[in-house]
Image (cartoon, rainbow, N blue to C red):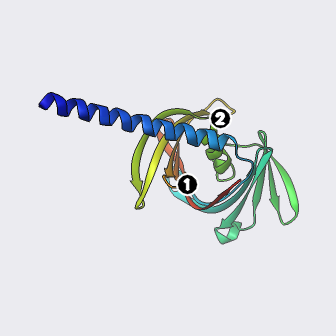
């Protein structure tokens, strides 16, 4: 009788893993076909001496993305447009080339989240409850344009697969987190 229960338990675990794996594949396929995303999020940059919090809104399309700071008040309205690897900072009608964009910044983290969701190498997938919501957690290995390895862990709501929370890690350290406030995709 014990052997039957052990076999049933093993089959249940295998079926659950397959289902999560299939869900992860569907998420990656659907994110790979997105044409336009508008997302608002709270971005927290985790520095050695302090954390810095920003509220940002990003309009992403395959050709590029524009991220605008909504808070803190002293930076409100500052925006950055990323196209390829170039970054342009915009303020009150003026634009300034800011050189190459960094993936782990409030200006580029939402586009990188969308990139990772579509093209990242799936390292781990599992079920988890976050902020009272049933989520599918996907850890995705990515490589930034400068060769830096970035682990992007995304918690997707199981109903609709909206990214609820995201952690960006480099060298085993969480560098930036995102908590989604709103998400619209086409």
* Residue 149 shows up from this direction: no
Residue, far left: 1
- At x 12% / y 31%, what residue is drawn? 2
Vertical comparison of 124 with 92: above or below: above
| Viewer-nearest residue: 117 or 35 | 35
Tell me the quadrant of the picture where the N terminus can be found.
top left
* Local SS, label 1: loop
Q: Which mark identifies residue 144?
A: 2
| Viewer-nearest residue: 29 or 177 | 29
Please tell me how crowded label 1 is: few (under 14), some (14-19), or many (20+) other residues with Cα within 10 Å. Answer: few
| Viewer-nearest residue: 82 or 47 | 82
Where residue 71 sits in the image (x, y, percent)? 64, 68
- At x 37% / y 35%, what residue is drawn? 15
Name the quadrant containing residue 86: top right
Q: Name the residue tied to disc 1.
A: 160
Measured in 3D between alpha carbons, the distance from the residue under mark 1 to the one under mark 2, in whole angstroms, is 28 Å
* Local SS, label 2: loop
């Amino acid at each position: 009788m014990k052997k039957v229960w052990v076999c049933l338990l093993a089959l249940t675990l295998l079926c659950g893993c397959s289902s999560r794996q299939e869900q992860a594949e569907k998420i990656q396929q659907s994110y790979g076909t997105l044409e336009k995303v508008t997302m608002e999020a709270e971005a927290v940059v985790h520095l050695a001496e302090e954390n810095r919090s920003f509220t940002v809104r990003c309009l992403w399309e395959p050709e590029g993305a524009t991220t605008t700071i909504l808070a803190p008040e002293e930076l409100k309205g500052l925006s950055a447009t990323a196209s390829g690897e170039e970054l342009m900072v915009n303020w009150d009608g003026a634009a300034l080339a800011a050189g190459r964009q960094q993936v782990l910044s409030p200006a580029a983290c939402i586009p990188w989240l969308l990139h990772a969701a579509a093209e990242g190498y799936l390292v781990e997938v599992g079920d988890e409850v976050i902020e009272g919501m049933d989520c599918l957690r996907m850890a995705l290995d990515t490589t930034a344009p400068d060769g830096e390895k970035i682990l992007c862990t995304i918690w997707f709501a199981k109903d609709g697969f909206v990214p609820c929370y995201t952690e960006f890690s480099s060298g085993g350290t969480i560098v930036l987190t995102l908590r989604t406030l709103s998400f619209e995709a086409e």
